[in-house]
Amino acid sequence: MQDIADLRARFESDSVHIRSGAGDLIYVDVCNDLGESTMTLHGAHVMRYAVRGGQPVLWMSAESRFESGKAIRGGVPLCWPWFGAHPEGAPFPAHGYARICEWDLTEIRRLPGGEDQLEFHLRREVVPESLKPLPFLLSYIVTVGSSLTLELTMTNQGELPREISCALHSYFAVSEIGNVEVRGLEKVRYLNALTGVESVDSAPIRVAAETDRIYMETTGAIEIVDSGWERTILLERSGSASAVVWNPWGDKACRMADFGDGEYGSMLCVETANAASDRRMLGPGEQHRIICRIQEKSVHGAVFSGKKTKK
């Protein structure tokens, strides 16, 4: 684990504060004129984001764990190098090891537009050998401003080709799930992970039961339209030809120790992914980058750009 005093000396500024918090994890709070965010080095996990002074865009469970070796429920977990269950089962954790390992904070940059950009790296040495860590360099860049940009770059430093799957597993806060529809995935083929059946819908997605879908051969923007909060969350993606839509609904939520029984009504996962048929094979020295830009707009299309404050 990095030394918190050293991190403070290197990176703290008028917009960046580094602290110890729940679970003795290291947290990075960013608050600039454009946006606000909280991240932790555990999993390089983005837990909170909002336009400055605005409504939270990301959702966090009140039952979330903050423990070494455990995933955090909510925000944006990093699923890598596999999405879902590992083919060999236990002891391999669901959604890979990137979200349960300690990342290094290596740089913070103030961009000309006023955004703060944080860069994290995952070292192979911090991954338990029992999880058979791949010989990859992982770099994760998070840009906090009037939008939130997440950029995960993976480079195969080994001597053999390796197949990976991954996701920026973003949990979004909503006023009430019945007020929400997801646009941009109409007429896109999807795999229903609950039934194993492939299907296509012609209308926007409205969630009214447990939902776990992988949408395939899709690269366009996705909108989460929330009539209750009169806002749209826009996801623009790159390096991704699949997307996941997930909500556990009531029965499954009750079976999850780190998810409140009634919390399913206040969240929706819409994920930028390389999953199912969108898995990627990377040869020695090859690199792949997956990016998601998240921006909040009014239902009428106006971009929320943050509340300027005097210094």
Image (cartoon, helix red, strand yellow):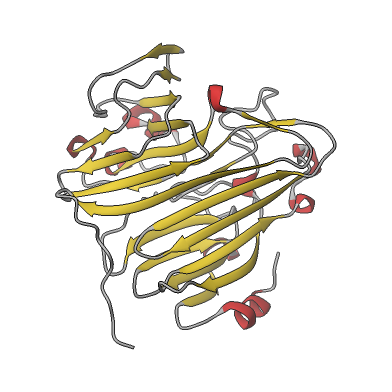
Residue 167 visible in the shown view = yes
Q: Is residue 63 above or below residue 132?
A: below
Residue at the bottom extreme of this rendering: 311
Position of residue 72 measured from the top left corner of the image (x, y, whole percent): 51, 49
Q: Residue at x 60, y 79 (%)?
A: 8
Residue at the right extreme of this rendering: 159
Q: Nearer the viewer, residue 19 or 298?
A: 298
Q: Residue at x 55, y 65 (%)?
A: 118
Q: Is residue 299 above or below residue 120?
A: above
Looking at the rendered structure, the number of numbered marks drawn on it comes to: 0
Q: Is residue 309 above or below residue 232?
A: below
Position of residue 260 measured from the top left corner of the image (x, y, whole percent): 37, 43
Position of residue 67 measured from the top left corner of the image (x, y, whole percent): 59, 54
Q: Residue at x 76, y 40 (%)?
A: 134
Q: Quadrant of the C terminus?
A: bottom left
Quadrant of residue 165 in the image?
top right
Position of residue 78 measured from the top left corner of the image (x, y, whole percent): 55, 45
Instruction: Say left or right for 233 vs 32.
Output: left
Q: Nearer the viewer, residue 193 or 67?
A: 193
Q: Nearer the viewer, residue 219 or 16?
A: 219
Quadrant of residue 224 in the image?
top left
Residue 60 visible in the shown view = no
Q: Nearer the viewer, residue 57 or 67?
A: 57
Q: Quadrant of the N terminus?
A: bottom right
Instruction: Say left or right for 189 vs 43.
Output: left
